[in-house]
């Protein structure tokens, strides 16, 4: 908490059997730690592969030929969001993985400064 200057932390442990955030988006937080323990993990795009003006419900955010970089189970990722100091317009563009209904579940952990 000292590193982030936060008064408290938000901690979540999710078990999901459905898609949570299947569209590419950025978070309006300073930084979020993610770790997936079961099921598919988050995918993200490098900045040069993003069309930021297309962020929203119907936009084509990934440039043609863009590679969605997948996190693997047990990877610990720190995703800087739009609220990180000096990071407006540069938050990590990411999405939750698709979850096949009735066939898999996803267990992931997240922490963010609040």
Image: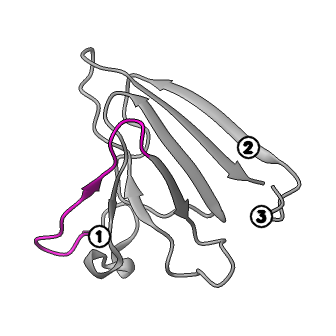
Q: CA distance from mark 3 to mark 1?
A: 32 Å
Q: Is residue 38 above or below residue 1?
A: above
Q: Which mark is residue 3?
A: 3
Count residues near mark 2 (Cα–Cα under 10 Å), then give few for <14, some for 14-19, many for 20+. few
Quadrant housing residue 68: bottom left
Residue wearing tag 1: 61
Residue at left offset 44%, top offset 35% = 36
Residue farthest to the top, as pictured: 102
Count residues near mark 1 (Cα–Cα under 10 Å), then give few for <14, some for 14-19, many for 20+. many
Residue at left offset 84%, top offset 49% = 8
The percent position of residue 31, horizontal first and vertical second, equals 62, 61
Q: Check if residue 5 falls in the magenta segment.
A: no
Q: Which residues are magenta?
A: 60-75
The percent position of residue 51, horizontal first and vertical second, equals 31, 79
Label located before the other in sequence (2 or 1): 2
Q: Nearer the viewer, mark 2 or mark 3?
A: 3
Q: Quadrant of the N terminus?
A: bottom right
Quadrant housing residue 30: bottom right
Q: Is residue 81 above or below residue 95?
A: below
Residue wearing tag 2: 10
Helix, strand or loop under label 1: loop
The percent position of residue 112, horizontal first and vertical second, equals 68, 51
């Amino acid at each position: 908490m000292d590193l982030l200057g936060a008064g408290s932390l938000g901690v979540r442990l999710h078990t999901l059997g459905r898609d949570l955030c299947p569209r590419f988006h950025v978070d309006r937080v300073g930084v979020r730690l993610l770790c997936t323990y079961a099921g598919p993990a988050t995918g993200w795009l490098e900045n040069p592969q993003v069309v930021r003006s297309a962020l929203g419900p119907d936009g084509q955010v990934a440039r043609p030929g863009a590679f969605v970089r997948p996190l693997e189970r047990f990877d610990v990722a720190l995703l800087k969001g739009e609220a990180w100091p000096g990071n407006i317009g540069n938050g990590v563009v990411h999405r939750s993985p698709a979850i096949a209904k009735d066939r898999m579940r996803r267990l992931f952990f997240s922490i963010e400064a609040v």
